[in-house]
Amino acid sequence: MRILVRAPNWIGDQVLAFPFFYFLRKAFPGAHIASACVPWVEGLQFRNLVDEVITLPRPARAGFFSKLKNMDAGALLARARGPWDFGISLPNSFSAAWFLKRAGALRRRGYGVEGRGILLSEPVGWDPDPDRHRAQAYVDLLAPDFKSRRPVKEFWDQTPANELDDPVKGEMSMFDAVAAWPCDDILEPPKSPYWVLAPGATADSRRWGLERFARLAKIISQQTGLEGVIVGGPAEARASVELSEDPSLRLTDCVAHCPVQGLWKIFGGAKFTVTNESGLSHVAALCGSPVQIVCGAADPKRTRPLGPGRVRVVFNPVDCWPCERNICTEPPAGQLRCLRGIEPDAVWEEIKSVARV
């Protein structure tokens, strides 16, 4: 059996797909499984669960025809690595289903949405439950005999909030980053106890203000004396420099010092991690860090990080929340009320609960 999976396009979604890949490998232990992905999540493919990673080319330039040519090149690349007995599309886009068809997968499964049912030999009906978690949606693409009967939110062992209670046993207790994400460029953690700050996000509607992160960092420094480490991509470079230049915050700039998969050790050893609802919040939770999320437009019922690390989400449920839009459409006076209503003191109280500091 040769299986081709079109992997998710975003960091957070790729991390949420871990239970899917786990159950797929468990169901087909002897199969050759290939994961086809865009370049920016190539390093986050789970090498211990797949046999091959096919990295799709980037578009040479913007424009419809350039994108179409790029899509075809990626599909033909996968076709040349075939043949494929079975293909599964995790993204719900038309292009992802077209990719499986063009790559020559004989059986093609995915959700029959976006008018793409004609491209899938086994279209799956979409569950309209608005609270269904995205990781559950991925796992539900597998046949019932190939997955656990328990909800995917119970995939990881659960540490009880009360130390007198027994832990809840899941499918796994810890994520093996060394096996899943082999990487030579790993960010080494400080020798003294520390916390991690990941202030970036892809959209304004999910990005807490830098001034508020600074106020929170000052509270953490004063209350705990912990050193902080700032991580993120090149887009966070300027903010990281600004934060790290204030000695009272005790923050070290480590932005863009390694690829995302190289952050596993810094997350795994942290007392806690503070993030927006971003891809790095998912990476941190998967690597075992207690995670405190400042949530803007996102819906935590559907996209809350899953992993061995405990996760707390602080949010401000204004009347338009959760809109899940990247750009706030409220009038200027009400712009980003969901984020502006979250104060650093409230986040600190949540951190004390998740990290027991």
Image (spheres, helix red, strand yellow):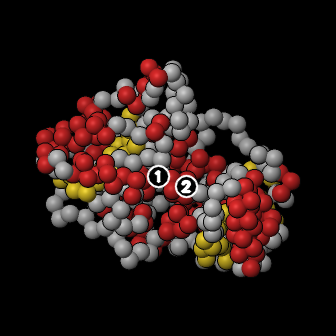
Does dot 1 land on a helix, a strand or a loop? helix
Which residue appears at 33% of the width and 55% of the height? 237
Residue at 72% in and 55% down: 64
Answer whether labels 2 and 1 touch (C-beta < 8 Å).
yes
Residue located 83% across and 51% down the image? 117
Viewer-proximal residue among 152 and 313:
313
Please tell me whether residue 295 is drawn above or below residue 13 in the rendered image.
above
How busy is the neighbourhood of tag 2: few (under 14 within 10 Å), some, or many (20 plus)?
Answer: some
Q: Position of residue 60 (x, y in %)?
A: 63, 66
Report if residue 225 is visible in the image. Answer: yes
The residues tagged by marks 2 and 1 sit, at their Cα atoms, a distance apart of 7 Å
- Is 292 located above or below residue 101 in the figure? above
Instruction: Please give left or right for residue 301 compared with residue 98 in the image.
Output: left
Q: Which residue is mark 1?
A: 279
Q: Is residue 55 left or right of residue 305?
A: right
Precedes in sequence: disc 2 or disc 1? 2
Residue 10 numbered mark, or none? 2
